[in-house]
Amino acid sequence: MPVQVSYPGVYIDEFTPGAPIQGVGTNTAAFIGIAQDGPLNEPVKVTSWENFLARFGRLPVQGTYLWYAVRGYYQNGGQVCYVVRASNGSYQRMTLNDRTAAPGRPLVALRARQPGALGIAVTVADAPLLTNVAVYRPSGTLAAQALQNALEVTLGADGAIVAANVANRFKPGDEVSFSSGTDRRVIASVAGAVVRFTLPLSQVINAGQTMRLANTPNSARTFRLRPPGAGPLPAGQLVPGTILRFAQGGSADTQVVESVMSEVLTEGAQGGLAPVTYRVTLRSGLAMQLDLDPAAANAPTASSNEINLTITLGAVNIVYDRLSMDPAHPRYVLDILNGDPGGLLLATQVEPPPANNVANSIPRAGAAAALNPVANGSAEDLATLTTGHFTAAIETLRAIDDVNFVAVPDRPSANNQPMLTVQQALISHCELMADRFAVLDSDPGIPLFGNNSFVQQRRGLDSSRGYAALYGPWLRVVPSNDGPPILVPPSGHVSGIIARSDASRGVHKAPANEIVNGALGVEPRMSLVDQGQLNLLGINIVQVFQDGGRPVLWGARTTATDTNWQYVNIRRLFLYLEESIQEGIRWAVFEPNNLALWQKLKRTLTDFLMRAWRDGALFGAKAEDAFYVRIDEILNPFSEQQLGRLHIEVGVRPSYPAEFIVVRIGIWDGGSEVSET
């Protein structure tokens, strides 16, 4: 907005160019399959092979390949992936309800860590650590008259307690009042029997008058508590995150503790009270006033609101005690349940949480409520897994934005048709999301040509704009035990090669001519003539060129029917460019659609594409040969501007892979030339 000028002088009006486009990530994989352990049908971010073993089991399920695919991914340079455990099992679920009118509203969702009808029972019981702790109400008697405008008063002895220790009942920051007059003053310091204020007194306070803590106003946040007992409170009984209920007479309010500071009283333990007070500051002001006159009939008190959670499975009872519902508390319900490695349940806060005051945001005492429709849970039965369970697992990846390529190494294997169905669902998912790529495996043990062959499988996997690539044959790898080598699908190893190539060369480099780490061989091994037939159909082969040689990924074609998109790196380069541009110019939405915006966007896009050209992603001796950015009035007539639209045309010339290198060689008869200048 222009600077508003009024007086003569120099004004500063900052301006900024369009924010530069930051390229999105390209090397995060997702895998869907069967696992020994781990959450069901839920994407889990995995950052290392050890992390996968801890979450999904240290051994593979017999006859399944997710374990080997993820191992191959990390062996070949993958760094981050998401794993979805496809399953037909379900978890027992229940809720802890809040304290509104019975039966209350869901507050915390509980889920068994293992699938099945386990019959877990959960019971909540109130277990306050602090009950009716006194709100501290000290008082002292003036030993001498304090004059008007005085900044201090001197207190006298209280029975056997010397004057200095009486004054020590008060601390800097306390607000006090007197038994005569209307002055309320904040204490600045205490030295011996002398109490000094931040402001002078407005009236005379005679000797013998009483000084005490002033009554709290509505919304006060700081109070002093003095618990019973000869010593201080045990550690953990009063901490940030403690939920306290204050009560006096018929009034009460519940708030959360923000901070706690202990204050030593030199008078020592008196009348069964501890020699310390605790200055408690609440997160929000108390919605009531407290009368702090020691002579008041009803003394104000504070009680905490901890709960015990008992989880019962058969004859086993697990008790989690001293829990709080505030995340700042060291024994926050969700942290304690989820942080127990041997626990039976996981807990999440219900979203959106019910609108509540603090008092009602505590789970109600009693049994947890069943949560339909999967309250009881059901056991996983791998024999009855269907394509529907795998396609449902694929759909869970919709919410994950940073996935770049997806593989399903495990598929129902009753016959070829269900296997193809899952792969077709994966291609549809990638085409719909338009920001990811499908890495497909050949079917196991099939011939190269003829009925039920590699070629026939390929015919069912067309993606018109090249959102998928098919790889084979299967790889011979070391098993999880000490047995002989086994065959596994190649998608995990290929995904690792894609991630490695992206990290070292860039998404524009075709992920091929790369050694397949972790693979001992392939089955079946095929000739270059056979591969030539398959390659032209868009089937990528892992090739072994000589006996004993290491397998090499020797293909980079998609399953596209449009030859513009027949190479993996071209399709993935455009995914990278499109998503980077989409996220990078989001700042321009709702900006004034004028020439200034057009120029900003053109500069921003040109700078981004210039970097891509310099990295080798685009072909051309000069930048203008490699790309163009067009924003003009032909693309954006006034009628389009009226509709709130801005059209930008970007053309790029990608660097295609040198898949076939033809060297022309012949006999040269020699000769020489001599020239003078």
Image: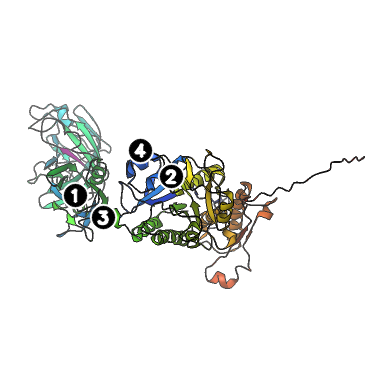
Percent coordinates x, y for residue 163 in the rendering: 14, 28
The amino acid type of the residue labelled 3 equals: Ser
- Mark 1–mark 2 distance (CA, rounded to whole Å): 45 Å
Mark 3, Cα crowd under 10 Å, few <14 / some 14-19 / many 20+, is: many
Q: Which residue bears the numbered disc 4?
A: 481
Per the image, label 3 sits on a secondary structure element best described as loop
Q: Which residue bears the numbered disc 1?
A: 254
Percent coordinates x, y for residue 150 in the rendering: 24, 35
Q: Which residue bears the numbered disc 2?
A: 80
- Mark 4–mark 2 distance (CA, rounded to whole Å): 25 Å
Mark before the other along the chain sequence, 4 or 2: 2
Q: Which of the 4 image quarters holds residue 416?
A: bottom left
Mark before the other along the chain sequence, 4 or 1: 1
Per the image, label 2 sits on a secondary structure element best described as loop
Q: Residue at 49%, 56% (x, y): give it.
A: 454
Q: Which residue bears the numbered disc 3?
A: 90
The amino acid type of the residue labelled 1 equals: Thr
- Mark 4–mark 1 distance (CA, rounded to whole Å): 58 Å
